Image: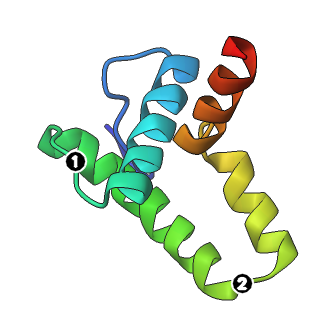
Amino acid sequence: MRHRNYGSKLGRQPAHRRATLRNLVTNVIEKERITTTVTRAKAAKPLVEQMITLGKRDTLHARRQAASEKSAKPEPAEEEKKEEKAGA
């Protein structure tokens, strides 16, 4: 029985599940729309809503909480700057 067990396991180990959900949340925030399965979307929805709530607060603490949940990918503008410096 799954009494009081919320959320889906998504058929993955805990670390892989966290990484999958983190990537889904990051993509939804950056691209505003993604294509995924219904189960993954249902698992990621509460996390996305929490990130939106953090964005509405507009405090330093909320920004840091959001940054800790977001997967650390450099912004495209930063990558271009690094490539220009390396090429010059």
Return the residue found at the far bottom.
57
Q: Quadrant of the C terminus?
A: top right
- The location of residue 11, given as percent across then percent down, is 31, 18
Residue at 60% across / 37% down in the picture? 71
- In this rendering, is residue 13 above or below 53? above
User: How far is the residue under mark 2 from the one under mark 1?
Assistant: 25 Å
- Provide residue 75's location: percent of width, then percent of height: 59, 42
- The first of marks 2 and 1 along the sequence is 1
**Label 1: which residue?**
34
Q: Please tell me whether mark 1 sits on a helix, a strand or a loop.
A: loop
Quarter residue 55 falls in = bottom right
**Is residue 86 visible to us here?**
yes
Disc number for residue 58: 2
Instruction: Answer above or below: position of 81 versus 65.
Output: above
Foreground residue, 88 or 68? 88
Relative depth, front residue between 9 and 36: 36
| Residue 7 at x, y percent in the picture | 39, 46
**Residue depicted at 31% across the width and 37% down the height:** 1
Residue type for callout 2: Asp
